Amino acid sequence: METIFHAFIFPGLLYALVWTVALFWFFRKFMAALHKRIGPHFNGYAGSYQTLFDFSKLLTKESITPHGVNPYLFSIMPILAVIVAILPSAFIPWTQTQLVIPSAYGLLALIVLVGIEPFLLFLTGFGSHNKYAFLGGIRVLAQAISMETAFFLSALSPALLFGTLDLNQIVQMSSWMSFAILIPGFVLYFIALLGLLEQPPFNIPDAEQEIVYGFYTEYSGTNYFFLKLSQFAEFMAVFGGAATLFLGGYKGLWFDGYLFLFIKMLLVAIVMMTIRAATPRITLAQMLSFSWRYLVPLSLLNLSWVMAAKLLFMGV
Amino acid sequence: MIILDIAKKTLRVAKAIFTKSPAQKDVRYEAMHHPQRYRGKHQINYESCIGCDSCNKICPTHAIVMKHLPFKKQNIVPEVNLSVCIFCGLCEDVCPTKPEKSIFLSGGRYDMLSGGWHEDQNNFWVNIDIPQSYIDSRLEAEEATRVKKELEAKKREAEAALKAQTDEGEHQ
Amino acid sequence: MENIANLLRSFTTQYIENYKATWIKVKLYSSHDLLTVALALKKEGLRSLVTVSPTDFPETDTIELNYFFEDLRTKRNVWLKCDIPRNLEECEIESLTPLFSGAEWNEREAFSMFGVRFLHHPDLRPIIVSEDFVGKTPYRRDFDWAAHEEQVSQNIQLIVDAFKKEQSTNAVNLDAESSETVLNWGPTHPASGPIRLRVHCDGEEIIGIDPDIGYVWRALEFLVTKKDFIGAIVAVERLCFMDNINSMIGYSMAVEEIAGVEITEFAKWMRVILGEVARVASHFVGLGMFFNNMGLHTLFMWNMDMRELFLDFLESYSGARIATAAIEPGGVRYTLEMNMLEQLQSAIDKFDEGIDEVYTIFVKNTTMKLRAAKVGVLSGDEIEDYALCGIVARASGVETDIRIDEPYAAYDQLDLSYITRKNGAALDRFTLIYEDLRQSITILKKAKKRLIEGVENGSFNPTADHMVKVPKKLPKGEAISRVEWSRGEVLMHLVTEEKGTNPYRLKIKAPSFNHTMMLNHLLKGQTLSDIPLIFGSLYICQGDLDR
């Protein structure tokens, strides 16, 4: 019974849906404010029903399966992508008591599950009988492999600092001192996050102006809705990881609780959106050279900094 | 360093949140900007139209069709097919009527909506509905002028005949 | 100019005349001399062949070809004509593409529209016209459009069959083992607009590009012959609706020259103001589209904010925001009321407030420079060879601006200077659009001040001076006029017949046509990510590409 509640209501399917709808609306209004526009305006107060209408429209549209693809591969991939994307949220401590799978290796599970997602996306691109989607799939693979290395290295630095892989313990042991030590790690984690989630300046696989829509090109209707849901669930997992590892999780100013975790995730989202409105895209070759020449060595340096700081400031 | 540059640009872009966007009006009900010369839906005045056919001749897309009326003179008025019209305003420029033109688009409506189907495009016209009273009054006026001309012609004939008689009488 | 006249006298010609200050008009006796004359002109320094324009004369059974040679450095130009027979078997002439690379597409267009065959042309295929017009000659005076348009379904079937055949030959020509493929960077692409590029690429590296244009072909040059001289402005303004006013100015100047009419000083200043407002409106969109192609939409949105007020001014003046139809032969179409200038002032004020932020955030953007500083480089020699113009030419250091070279309207009373950059990369073209925008606003401020002065001291009458009467029937003649359109130089060649009420032939030379010719040359060896970047930096508008 508990499992069904966790799988479908919180933090499972329904929670992911509500999160997607709310975050999508927030993204649109915030981008509009940055663009000196208004955004959705007419449906509901400040356009809050607009996303709901858009998603229900997607669900009622025809899911076109192109000629020449393997229909099982084509249609199963989005569902698999959603399941794999929602799984990491089972490991994040949402409140002091709510932790779906308490485990001593929570961080490792989080990282590995987030890392599997790009391979599924490559398969979506590979399975559509379309040159543009194939190019998009290849770009996803190249980007994911480069950015994930930096992502893993910077996500493991809190584990080094606190000496444990258990996410709940990491949250409980965090303090202002640990936040200050982990700031370089947070910056690196943030940049790698941009690369992993395909946001500007690294939105190369999703480059609308170059390769039509990358691996999303041939998907429409319910299939497309599931792919978008998996993308936002990935946001949720990665932002949750950022808040838990570096920003102190559910610890708040006067009381602890879910609200502060939500606010911290939203802060990370706001910074990501503002960077999105100010930076053009870079090419694949430039991204690869940036990642392997600067990002990965810097994250290795960060690991040594964390170890030195642990000795100096926190004792053994 | 590029990262510093990106951070600086991001901060500057973030200042745009505090500007108020002017696009607040609901343009389904009121226009943001509707000047006096706005080329909108045509208004045709059949009473002052003299039927010179200039608007038909200059229309670049042949959107104007002339409607025939049962008079002897000044017997055509324009009707406009709005799904062909490009709203260039040349018909308004050439109309010779004074003080106000008989066909003009300036200040016209901007929310011209036809129906949603292909057949509705054929019904997307500016039509002229002329009341029967106007037709009757014009026909009466024509009749009156015709009768008046006949009477005058008869009078002149009668005068000419009388003059010829008196001249004959004098000579005799 | 004397050198050119002496040079031309050494050939057999029908006449040599001086036409305006910088042009020499010459008609050759025989079309076989064309190659030698062209070679001699090229040695003399006239290295750009701008366009090739045939005119069809069925009464004398000839087609008269017009060639326009320009020397972009010293501003000397030659207008060369020659006659060739009209019937399709003998309608041929030597191609000038081996000497002037810019002639390649222009000769293809003359071939598709008039049936003129160019001998030794490297690749004489139809261009612009769709498959159902191949083999026919649409712009000749005796072509029956009505009969052609009755067979709609057969025409569509021809087009579909040709496309399917082309796609199947793609698969045949490519090696199955390699990663080479032919992509359609095509009309339903988010960044392309209505143009199709057949990209032959190996993975992400480009081997060759073959543009396929003609998706917006409205046959404007034919439509104009069906309307009278005033009604033709609605066809000419649709060259590109972003900057519709400068093309109307070019057409009106040609009509006024043939009619022998001089417009008032007030109308000249009004044309300057309207032309610069249209240029500003077009440059806002150009700046925004460059960044859109890199995935950043913020600049486009901010520019729309500023552009709306300029469009409000155009709407108050003429009644429409985009297709204004505000310039007619004889002056400008509407009277001016002084409160409209206040609206212009509020637009300029909003521009001044917002433009510095645009400069700091977008023009000096390091990430953009990382992408655009080294790609799409054009040298000055290539500019002359392909006859490029406008912003693309100035970004490579060639000083050419029609407002200064051959001043029209009131530009001779304004003190303009050339704005150039040296390197000719995509970044320089983008920066130059921004500099051009600022120069236009400076011109606007000066012109507005002059106009208000003129009205106040009584020399301009805004309600009566706007138009001079142009006769309905024009005498036989021909004229060319050049204007600096926002994307380059537009050259209009107008031919009228005796007591004609319609133009006999109007040739519009579009700058984007020559610019699109460069794509293959610029994009060889680059990656797929560079296509939207370079395409956007060349400031191409599909409206004037296809006309």
Image: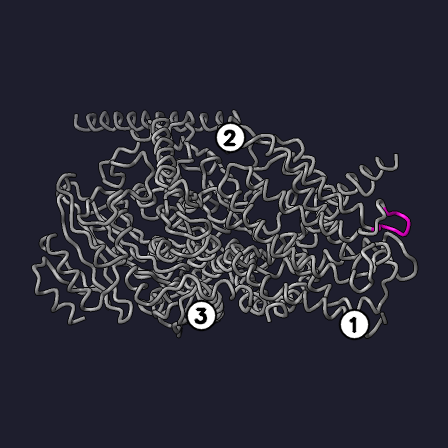
Q: Which residues are magenta?
A: A93-99
Q: Chain of mark 3?
A: C
Q: Which residue is mark 3?
A: C454
Residue A309's label in the rendered image is: 1
How many C-alpha atoms fall within 10 Å of the one at disc 2: few (<14), some, or many (≥20)?
Answer: few
Q: Is residue A5 above or below residue A272?
A: above
Q: Is residue C226 left or right of residue C9?
A: right
- Quarter of the rendering containing residue B159: top left
Q: Chain of mark 1?
A: A
Q: Answer whether labels 2 and 3 touch (C-beta < 8 Å).
A: no
Q: Which residue is mark 2?
A: A67
How far, Cα to Cα, is label 2 from label 3?
70 Å
How far, Cα to Cα, is label 2 from label 1?
58 Å
Do badges 3 and 1 share one subunit? no
Viewer-nearest residue: C17 or C473: C17
Residue A260 position within the rendered picture, expressed as x and y whole percent measured from the top left = 84, 56
Is residue A94 within the magenta segment?
yes
